[in-house]
């Protein structure tokens, strides 16, 4: 029996090593270990924990922040990249998202691009300018271009209500963010939800942090797991380490 167990263990280790090597060779990096919040930081960590092998942000009636709390990846800034992760969210008015190419400002608030996640309204799957003056940069179903002067041209590629029809936000869903130069694309469960080409001279961001928020008010819970990051060159190729 002991020989069988040892053999099985070696088989597992060999398989794990092969998967890790394949992930490394394709440029994907795990930025959350699934067990601890090592490498992630928020102004008040009491709102964040690891549950179900996921980064979990939660507010309750008795434990509610005075303002948004953002947990920020400490691994540095991203510029051209792909990010994949699974998410689920609970609460009638729950609101979160993935900040990218963003900036940490006063009180730990994170400003900039957000791949939106929300349980109500038209926001899920859109690109939002968090704390910025431009608000919605590309709503779900839109493919927008913002020129150097800030003029936005909108084109529809689908109906917002039908793109994610029937999605269960309390189940695990896949999010995929692709950002190469001014071109940003969001996908949920393999379906494109929003697209943006942002060339505005004063406001387009070429690099910044990754972060996820929770918001005060109605109790909410959001979870993120299996976070995989791939750094790219401006041409969309994997950067060599």
Image (tube, rainbow, N blue to C red):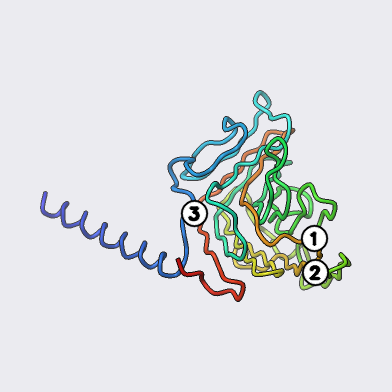
Q: Nearer the viewer, residue 199 or 87?
A: 199
> Label 3: which residue?
226
* Contact (Cβ within 8 Å) of mark 3 with mark 2: no
Q: Badge 3, how many Cα within 10 Å: few under 14, some, many 20+?
A: some
218 is higher (above) or lower (below) than 163: above
Q: Is residue 160 left or right of residue 45?
A: right
Looking at the image, tell me whether mark 2 or mark 1 is earlier in sequence order. Answer: 1
Q: Is residue 218 above or below residue 179?
A: above
Q: Which numbered disc, 3 or 2, marks the residue that appears first in the sequence? A: 2
Instruction: Tell me where residue 82 appears, x and y as whole percent.
Output: 57, 64
Residues marked 2 and 1 touching at CB (< 8 Å): yes
Dot placed on the residue nearer the N-terminal end, 1 or 3: 1
Instruction: Kindly report the distance in space between the C-alpha atoms of the residues bearing marks 3 and 2.
Output: 29 Å
- Quarter of the C terminus within the rendering: bottom left
Say which element carries label 3.
Answer: strand
Residue mark closest to the camera, 1 vs 3: 1
- Residue at 77% in and 73% down: 157
Return the residue at label 1. 137
Q: Nearer the viewer, mark 3 or mark 2?
A: 2
Q: Which mark is residue 144?
A: 2
Measuring 38% from the left and 68% from the top, which residue is drawn there? 22
Establish if 39 lies above or below 137. above
* Residue 212 drawn at (x, y percent): 63, 46
């Amino acid at each position: 029996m002991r020989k069988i167990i040892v053999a099985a263990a070696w088989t597992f280790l060999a398989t794990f090593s092969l998967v890790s090597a394949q992930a490394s060779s394709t440029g994907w990096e795990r930025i959350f270990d699934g067990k601890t919040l090592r490498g992630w930081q928020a102004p008040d960590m009491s709102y964040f924990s690891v549950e179900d092998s996921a980064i979990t942000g939660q507010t309750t009636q008795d434990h509610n922040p005075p303002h948004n709390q953002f947990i920020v990846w400490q691994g540095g800034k991203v510029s051209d990249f792909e990010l994949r992760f699974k998410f689920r969210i609970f609460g009638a008015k729950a609101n979160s998202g993935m900040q990218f190419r963003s900036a940490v400002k006063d009180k730990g608030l994170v400003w900039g691009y957000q791949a939106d996640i929300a349980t109500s309204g038209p926001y899920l799957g859109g690109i939002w300018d968090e704390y910025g003056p431009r608000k919605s940069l590309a709503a779900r179903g839109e493919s927008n271009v913002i020129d150097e002067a800030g003029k936005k041209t909108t084109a529809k590629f689908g109906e917002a209500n039908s793109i994610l029809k029937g999605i269960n936000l309390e189940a695990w869903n896949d999010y995929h963010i692709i950002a190469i130069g001014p071109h940003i694309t969001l996908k949920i469960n393999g379906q494109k939800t929003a697209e943006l080409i942002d060339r505005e001279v004063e406001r387009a961001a070429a690099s910044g942090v990754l972060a996820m928020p929770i918001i005060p008010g109605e109790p909410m819970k959001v979870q993120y797991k299996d976070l995989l990051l791939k750094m790219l060159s401006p041409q969309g190729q994997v950067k060599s380490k």
